[in-house]
Image: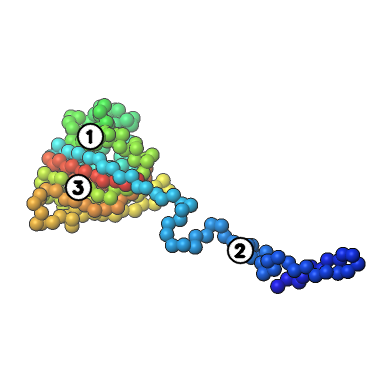
């Protein structure tokens, strides 16, 4: 309790009791106006709402050889920067069509975009070997968008023509400009239920972040067509 105040008046001292003398005016020095003393969501922090969407990818290997190719990875996409690690054919050599070497190749063994936004790779005599298409947005538009507006792939419904294609792994990779790399492998066969009615459809659960330095590597068997219905969150 604080000492009373002495007031001098008319030649005499009077004691005056302080109002609310139990109040400690230093107590508010420890007050945290950001603290939440109740259980539940913080009303000062807006709840993040995930946007969900899906798109289709149609991949066709018209050649007589197994082809390995890349999806996404906008900054270092093999469509603009040659990646010899993906070359498994003597004729489908993935020379970027827009490069000096690609222009000189006159359409033979190059990879690039058609006027309709499809990814296209050619082999000998400029014959189409591989195409990748996104019907909703064009693959060129999807690739550009993935670099500017990252998303996460949370599910893939894969439809194949031949059972052997299910054994081909899906590789998620990161390759940043500082040289760091990381790879994770998904085996679609592990998601296949042998008792399911549709033997050429596999539903893959995953969590694969995609941005300008992340992408997928996939192998397509000769003469195969594969369709991905891709579920994403952003």
Between marks 1 and 3, how big is the CA–CA gap? 16 Å
Please give the name of the residue rendered at 15% of the width and 45% of the height, measured from the top-left corner. 159
Disc 2 designates what residue?
30
Query: Residue 77 placed where, x, y %?
Result: 32, 40
For the N terminus, the image quarter is bottom right
Vertical placement of residue 124 versus 10, above or below = above
For the C terminus, the image quarter is top left
Please give the name of the residue rendered at 68% of the width and 66% of the height, measured from the top-left corner. 20
Give the mark toward the camera: 1 or 2. 2
Judge the density around disc 1: few (<14), some (14-19), many (≥20) Cα neighbours within 10 Å: few
Q: Is label 3 in contact with label 2 (beta carbons under 8 Å)?
A: no
Q: Is residue 149 visible?
A: yes
Query: Residue 119 placed where, x, y %?
Result: 25, 34
Q: Secondary structure at mark 2?
A: helix
Q: Quadrant of residue 88?
A: top left
Numbered tag placed on residue 167 in the rendering: none
């Amino acid at each position: 309790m604080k000492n009373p105040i002495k007031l001098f008046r008319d030649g005499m001292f009077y004691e005056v009791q302080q109002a609310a003398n139990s109040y400690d005016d230093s107590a508010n020095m420890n007050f945290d106006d950001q603290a939440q003393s109740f259980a539940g969501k913080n009303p000062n922090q807006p709840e993040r709402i995930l946007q969900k969407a899906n798109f289709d990818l149609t991949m066709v290997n018209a050649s007589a050889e197994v082809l390995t190719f890349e999806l996404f990875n906008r900054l270092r996409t093999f469509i603009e920067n040659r990646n010899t690690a993906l070359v498994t054919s003597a004729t489908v050599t993935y020379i970027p069509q827009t490069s000096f070497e690609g222009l000189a190749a006159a359409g033979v063994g190059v990879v690039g975009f058609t006027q309709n936004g499809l990814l296209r790779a050619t082999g000998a005599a400029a014959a189409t070997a591989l195409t990748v298409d996104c019907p909703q947005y064009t693959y060129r538009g999807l690739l550009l968008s993935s670099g500017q507006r990252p998303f996460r792939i949370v599910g893939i419904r894969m439809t194949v023509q031949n059972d052997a294609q299910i054994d081909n792994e899906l590789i998620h990779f990161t390759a940043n400009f500082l040289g760091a790399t990381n790879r994770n492998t998904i085996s679609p066969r592990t998601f296949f239920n042998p008792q399911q009615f549709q033997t050429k459809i596999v539903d893959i659960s995953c969590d694969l972040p995609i941005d300008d330095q992340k992408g997928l590597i996939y192998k397509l068997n000769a003469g195969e067509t594969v369709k991905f219905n891709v579920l994403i969150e952003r």
